[in-house]
Amino acid sequence: MDVATLKARIDARGAFVVDVRTPGEFAQGHVPGAVNIPLQELKARIGELEPHRSEDFAVICAVGGRSAAAVDYLRSQGFDKVVNVVGGTKAWVQAGYPVE
């Protein structure tokens, strides 16, 4: 999913977004409402995502590499509707979208 599609989903109906960057990166600015679960903690914290198993949700990082790895892992665990945000937070900011 590109950042324009994510922004449209957030504006239309809200969207669950998981940011897999480090807490320090997350604190510097993130998609409004995103939940921070760093990639290195994903396996240990997967239970936090259980309520969203049947939902479409997005995973984002800085440019798309870590989030792609997270999506691969989540799909292997049965999260079939999870998508990677191509271009990551860098593309989000470059598009002029808000961060918190």
Image: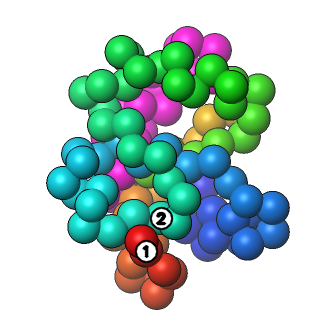
Query: Are dots 2 and 1 in contact, CB under 8 Å?
Result: yes
| Majority secondary structure of magenta residues | helix
- Label 1: few (<14), some (14–19) or many (≥20) C-alpha neighbours in 10 Å: some
The answer, for residue 49, to whether it is visible in the render is: yes
Q: Which mark is residue 31?
A: 2
The tally of labels here is: 2
Local secondary structure at mark 1? loop
**Residue 64: % across, % down:** 37, 51
**Amino acid beneath label 2:** Val
Q: Which mark is residue 11?
A: none
The residue lying at 18 percent from left, 54 percent from top is 24
**Residue 83: % across, % down:** 59, 42
Q: Is residue 69 magenta?
A: yes
Instruction: Report the magenta residues as a range.
Output: 61-80
Q: Is residue 12 left or right of residue 38?
A: right
Could you tell which of marks 2 and 1 lies nearer the N-terminus? 2
Q: Is residue 80 left or right of residue 17?
A: right
Q: Is residue 37 left or right of residue 40?
A: right
- Return the residue nearer the eye: 52 or 84: 52
In the picture, the quarter occupied by the C terminus is bottom left
- Image quadrant in which you'd find residue 80: top right
Q: Which mark is residue 99?
A: 1
Alpha carbons under labels 2 and 1: distance apart: 5 Å
- Return the residue nearer the eye: 54 or 86: 54
**Residue 15: % across, % down:** 68, 54
In the picture, the quarter occupied by the N terminus is bottom right
**Image position of 77 with respect to 83: above or below:** above
**Amino acid beneath label 1:** Val
**Furthest residue toward bottom:** 96
The answer, for residue 65, to whether it is visible in the render is: no
The residue lying at 73 percent from left, 72 percent from top is 11
